[in-house]
Image (tube, rainbow, N blue to C red):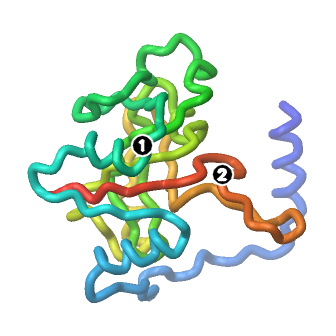
């Protein structure tokens, strides 16, 4: 028996009282009259920027306008023609260090908290976290009300990894000073794509 199995056995042997799982069928999760409006509000509240892309508008022009000083842009999305790095073709994830803007695709957004489900869609997922700035393309028709709905929609692809991202990385746990980009992107811009 391994150490892990031995530890788990000790826990199980010392359980004194067992409880049935609660009935979750009666949970009424929050819903919104207009989930898209709520998603935009929450995204901005957590420090993100939201741009609604109009039909026929070139996202490359939008990204260049929002990040005019960006020199290193990482993306494997076919519609992103301004990318200077492709996370599918680098030999080592460390080659993506110094990425000014990472551009990825979200599957759906959550109105309740402004987060977006991002399954791994590239060989090197580090682009989601190492980029100074992150741009997420999201179909504006793919917004759910709450995390209950979101968890029912979560799917993994062959990479077997995904994450929810909501706005830029931030922390205020040291001297109660808000630091943006503490563990990941300093800014997040969501491009709401026409459906």
Q: Nearer the viewer, mark 2 or mark 1?
A: 1
Report the number of discs: 2
In the image, is residue 6 above or below residue 88?
Answer: below
Q: Position of residue 99 (x, y in %)?
A: 54, 31
Q: Which residue is mark 2?
A: 181
Instruction: List the single residue furthest toward the top.
Output: 91
Q: Are marks 2 and 1 in contact (CB under 8 Å)?
A: no
User: Mark 1: few, some, or many residues within 10 Å (few <14, many ≥20)?
Assistant: few
Identify the residue at image location x=47%, y=30%.
71
> Could you give the CA–CA distance between mark 2 and mark 1, rounded to whole angstroms?
19 Å
Does residue 180 appear to the left or right of 12 in the view shown?
A: left
Q: Tag 1 or tag 2, which sits nearer the N-term? A: 1
Secondary structure beneath label 1: loop
Does residue 175 appear to the left or right of 58 in the view shown?
A: right
Does residue 171 appear to the left or right of 144 in the view shown?
A: right
**Depth order, front residue of 70/163:** 70
Q: Position of residue 147 (x, y in %)?
A: 45, 70
Q: Which residue is mark 1?
A: 68
Q: Position of residue 102 (x, y in %)?
A: 46, 38
Secondary structure beneath label 2: loop
Image quarter (top left, top right, bottom left or bottom right) of the N terminus: top right
Image quarter (top left, top right, bottom left or bottom right) of the C terminus: bottom left
**Depth order, front residue of 146/33:** 33
């Amino acid at each position: 028996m391994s150490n892990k199995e031995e530890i788990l056995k000790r826990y199980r042997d010392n359980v004194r009282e067992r409880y049935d799982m609660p009935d979750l069928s009666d949970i009424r999760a929050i819903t919104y009259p207009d989930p898209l409006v709520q998603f935009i509000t929450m995204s901005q509240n957590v420090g993100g920027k939201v741009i609604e892309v109009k039909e026929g508008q070139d996202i490359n022009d939008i990204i260049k306008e929002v990040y005019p000083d960006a020199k290193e842009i990482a993306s494997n999305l076919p519609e992103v023609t301004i990318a200077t790095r492709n996370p599918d073709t680098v030999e080592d994830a460390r080659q993506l260090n110094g990425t000014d803007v990472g551009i990825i695709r979200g599957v759906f957004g959550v109105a309740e908290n402004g987060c977006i489900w991002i399954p791994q869609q590239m060989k090197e997922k580090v682009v989601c976290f190492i980029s100074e700035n992150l741009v997420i393309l999201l179909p504006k028709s793919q917004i759910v009300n709450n995390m209950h709905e979101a968890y029912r929609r979560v799917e993994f692809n062959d990479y077997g990894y995904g994450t929810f991202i909501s706005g830029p990385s931030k922390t205020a746990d040291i001297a109660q000073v808000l630091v943006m980009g503490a563990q990941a992107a300093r800014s997040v811009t969501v491009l709401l794509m026409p459906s």
